[in-house]
Image (cartoon, rainbow, N blue to C red):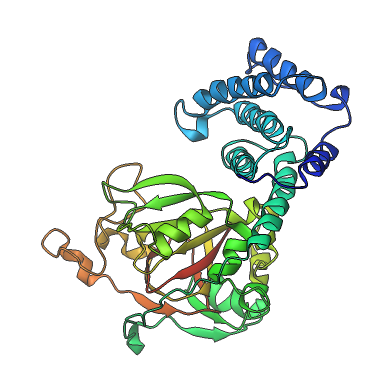
């Protein structure tokens, strides 16, 4: 197993991103965090700046991670105290330091990238988001290494998707680059769906940095992300897993490992996790008509093979769905027709319909056929405005990457 030639410089880059000494390394928590845990954190901080064996550094970090992981997995996520998420991030930071201190191998550096990602996904930002800074340093090293290997470019066998025919009377209207005033008057205030054309043509993701498989591997391949496994989240066998973007592409896009199920990188704030990808997109100007700051707009990635389905459901915010790669069939229903859409009775799925839109059980759901709808095939460069609480069903027709912007 090879080690990076520049490992001494790798640690010098990481240590340069850390505070210069122990006194300037902050460790302040509320009373939620037991003093015994704070003591272990302080000991790990001491080991970071002092002489300690690799084993003792790793052990201290693992104790912090194990203890805080238990807290993160007790009760529902929204009731987890943010202080424990901060403790978890510190545990990840100390673990990365232990992994990278003494001439790590390529595999150990990849493990350190995963540790950073676990902190970014499950923890809360500490020390000006130090994990984001460190993962950038590590990723540069991984990239240098993979460039030296120069793997052959992959070619994905693309089949022509079967595109549903959209009849004119059901088609979502299309408008090319409306003014802010026109969009506000004709679509936003009356809450009318529309496809906006020509408003994201300037995105690097559609031009200079086209989101090919090769590009996504180069920018995000070694990063760990949450992936949904199964046809749709309402299925009993549906689950979630954490794998790297490379593993996701190999398994679910290239079908290298003989995996038969569907995988979907869905509703994930990938652009906060990987800022390089964020530079390839822009917030739609029309979001400025909302009442909140830009910081409160939720930007999600939706990346997967053909056949992924988001069941008919509604969201509590306005949504711009921008199509970057591939195409999707989408159907919309007005919130006025909710009674004909048979939402689940459970609190967990009350925003999701029980009806399988393209294969409805008319005996169980007789009123569904009476609900009027609009539909479209969303193509690269299109942006669909889905008004707040409008029910929407989405099926990808081929390999697809979409970006959603939820705003109020």
Residue 230, quarter of the rendered image: bottom left
Q: Using the image, determine if residue 7 lies above or below residue 278.
A: above
In the displayed image of the protein, which residue is found farthest to the front? 1
Q: Position of residue 94 (x, y in %)?
A: 69, 29
Q: Is residue 297 visible?
A: no
Q: Using the image, determine if residue 255 lies above or below residue 180.
A: above
Q: Is residue 78 visible?
A: yes
Q: Position of residue 98 (x, y in %)?
A: 69, 29
Picture residue at 14% right of the left edge, 65% below the top: 362
Q: Position of residue 6 (x, y in %)?
A: 78, 47
Tell whether 346 sits left or right of 295: left
Is 63 or 357 nearer to us in this picture? 63
Is 145 or 308 nearer to us in this picture? 145
Is 333 or 381 nearer to us in this picture? 381
Tell me the quadrant of the picture where the C terminus can be found.
bottom right
Tell me the quadrant of the picture where the N terminus can be found.
top right
Residue 373, quarter of the rendered image: bottom left
In the displayed image of the protein, which residue is found farthest to the left? 363
Query: How many numbered circles are shown?
Result: 0
Is 89 or 309 nearer to us in this picture? 89
Tell whether 342 sits left or right of 316: left
Q: Using the image, determine if residue 218 lies above or below residue 84.
A: below
Tell whether 103 sits left or right of 237: right
Q: Position of residue 114 (x, y in %)?
A: 59, 42
Q: Using the image, determine if residue 306 lies above or below residue 26.
A: below
In the displayed image of the protein, which residue is found farthest to the top? 36
């Amino acid at each position: 197993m090879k080690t990076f030639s520049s490992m001494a410089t790798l640690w010098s880059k990481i240590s340069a991103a850390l505070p210069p000494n122990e006194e300037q390394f902050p460790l302040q928590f509320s009373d939620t965090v037991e003093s015994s845990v704070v003591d272990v954190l302080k000991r790990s901080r001491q080991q970071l700046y002092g002489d300690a064996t690799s084993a003792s550094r790793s052990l201290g970090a693992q104790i912090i991670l194990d203890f805080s992981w238990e807290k993160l997995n007790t009760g529902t996520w929204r009731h987890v105290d943010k202080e424990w998420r901060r403790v978890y991030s510190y545990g990840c930071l100390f673990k990365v330091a232990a992994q990278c201190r003494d001439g790590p191998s390529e595999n150990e550096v990849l493990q350190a990238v995963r540790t950073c990602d676990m902190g970014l996904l499950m923890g809360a930002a500490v020390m000006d988001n130090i994990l984001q800074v460190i993962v950038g340093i590590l990723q540069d090293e991984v990239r240098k290494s993979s460039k030296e290997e120069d793997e052959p470019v992959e070619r994905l066998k693309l089949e022509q998707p079967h595109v549903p025919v959209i009849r004119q009377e059901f088609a979502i209207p299309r408008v090319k680059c409306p003014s802010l005033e026109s969009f506000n008057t004709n679509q936003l205030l009356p809450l009318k769906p529309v496809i906006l054309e020509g408003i994201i043509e300037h995105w690097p993701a559609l031009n200079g940095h086209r989101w090919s498989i090769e590009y996504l591997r180069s920018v995000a391949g070694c990063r760990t992300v949450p992936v949904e496994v199964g046809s749709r989240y309402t299925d009993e066998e549906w689950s979630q897993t954490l794998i790297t973007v490379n593993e996701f592409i190999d398994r679910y896009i290239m079908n290298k490992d003989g995996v038969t199920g569907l995988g979907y990188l869905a509703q994930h704030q990938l652009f906060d996790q990987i800022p390089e990808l964020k530079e390839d997109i822009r917030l739609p100007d029309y979001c400025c008509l909302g009442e909140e700051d830009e910081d409160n707009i939720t930007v999600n990635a939706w990346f997967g093979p053909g056949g992924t389905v988001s069941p008919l459901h509604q969201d509590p915010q306005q949504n711009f769905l921008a199509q970057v790669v591939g195409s999707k069939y989408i159907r919309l229903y007005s919130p006025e027709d909710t009674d004909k859409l048979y939402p689940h009775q459970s609190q967990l799925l009350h925003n999701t319909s029980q009806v399988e839109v393209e294969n409805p059980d008319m005996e169980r759901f007789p009123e569904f056929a009476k609900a009027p709808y609009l539909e479209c095939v969303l193509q690269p460069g299109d942006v669909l405005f889905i008004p707040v609480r409008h029910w929407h069903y989405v099926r990808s027709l081929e390999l697809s990457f979409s970006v959603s912007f939820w705003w109020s």
